[in-house]
Image: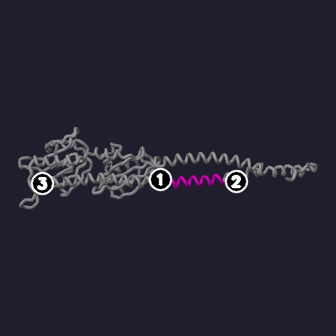
Amino acid sequence: MKRTGIATRLAIYILGAVFLIMGMVIGYSYQASSRSIVEMARRENAQMAQATAERIGAVFSNAARVTATMALSQEDIKINEPQILHMSRRILAANPEIFGMAVAFDPYAFDRSIELYAPYTCRRDNGTIESTILGSREYQYPYMDWFQLARELDRPIWTEPYFDGGNGGNRLMITYATPFARKTRDGLRKLGVVTADIDISWLRELVSGIRVFDTGYVFLLSRYGTYIVHPDRELVSNETIFSYAEYLGMDQLRHLGKRMVAGESGFEELKDLPGVGACDVAFVPLSGQSWSLGVVLPRNEMLAGLNRLTTTIVGISVAGFLFLAGLIVIVSKSITHPLRSLRMHTRAIANGDFSHALPPVV
């Protein structure tokens, strides 16, 4: 077997050490930089999520406040229909985020001759504010969740997203409903429910205006994990984060859903979210509401700049490595040339050629 020359072995040892050191430096630099970038992106998006949650929470708090005001107005005195409609119009004019408002009375509670009576004021597509009276065979509001839950629980509630196909909104909305009663000789008598409706499209427009790289997005969950806002509109009000996780077979998404509906805040890593891939999800609860807001941060986009920089560094390093390899080979050969010459002459003498002249001593 042919033995490797000294120059070759010297070059291999030096280049191997250089390659190992260079790989360790690039690897450590990439890992440290990626951690720093991810932590920075997490902090920034956590702040954005918190700010967005506070903005939405302020709308909810305002809707709850004006609904409570309207309910109080019904408890103290018996106001007539024009007064109810006038107050509702004023409230909607001062609160553009509220789509509609109703004062829904129990059957025969407003007038013994009228079974169902619910003055409703809402915005139309042309921007005008109009009023109508709800309650008919086609629209039996006493059986609606927003009426029954608030009425039977005797406390304010937020509904899950629902499509109101009656004369009320005829669109996907969420409703804040608070019951009201009136003092009588026999004590408080339950009379009905006051509601404030928020159009889901308003939340969608607010959230869709938030840019999270190219494929990232913001989503909103209800207290039970139902998607209220999501880029995939097929999921909105039709799926929960748990049913979606079951469909995808993603235990990580299910765990995220449990943390979100529990009112926690923090981060969760997902390995392969559809349309995004590996990502981090920053999530925060909404103040005054049992909902949760999440921000999806795509890992590949977070690290895109670092990956490009690392590719450039690796390219430069490879070019430098090849240059260094050539230089080491040349230097090694020049250093070991006298040894190779001496070996050649001594081999000739060892073979019996005693007349062979030795190289001059330098």
Category of crowding for the residue at label 1, using alpha-carbon neighbours closer than 10 angstroms: few (below 14), some (14–19), many (at least 20): some
Judging by the rendered image, the residue that carries numbered circle 2 is 13
Task: Determine if the magenta segment contains residue 28.
Answer: yes
Badge 3 crowding class, 10 Å Cα cut-off, few under 14, some 14 to 19, many 20 or more, is many
Tell me what residue is drawn at x 8 percent, y 49 percent.
80
Q: Which residues are magenta?
A: 17-35
- Distance CA(mark 1)–CA(mark 2): 36 Å
Above or below, comparing residue 307 to residue 187 in the picture: above
Look at mark 3 in the image and give the residue it sits on.
74
Q: Work out whether residue 341 can be spotted.
A: yes
Determine which of the numbered discs, if any, sits on residue 326 in the image.
none
Residue 249, image x, y percentages: 41, 49
Q: Position of residue 350 (x, y in %)?
A: 89, 52
Element class at badge 1: helix
Tell me the amino acid under the disc marked 2: Tyr
> Number of labelled discs?
3
Q: Please tell me how crowded label 2 is: few (under 14), some (14-19), or many (20+) other residues with Cα within 10 Å.
A: few
Farthest residue toward the right? 355
Dot 3 or dot 2, earlier in sequence: 2
Q: Which mark is residue 37?
A: 1
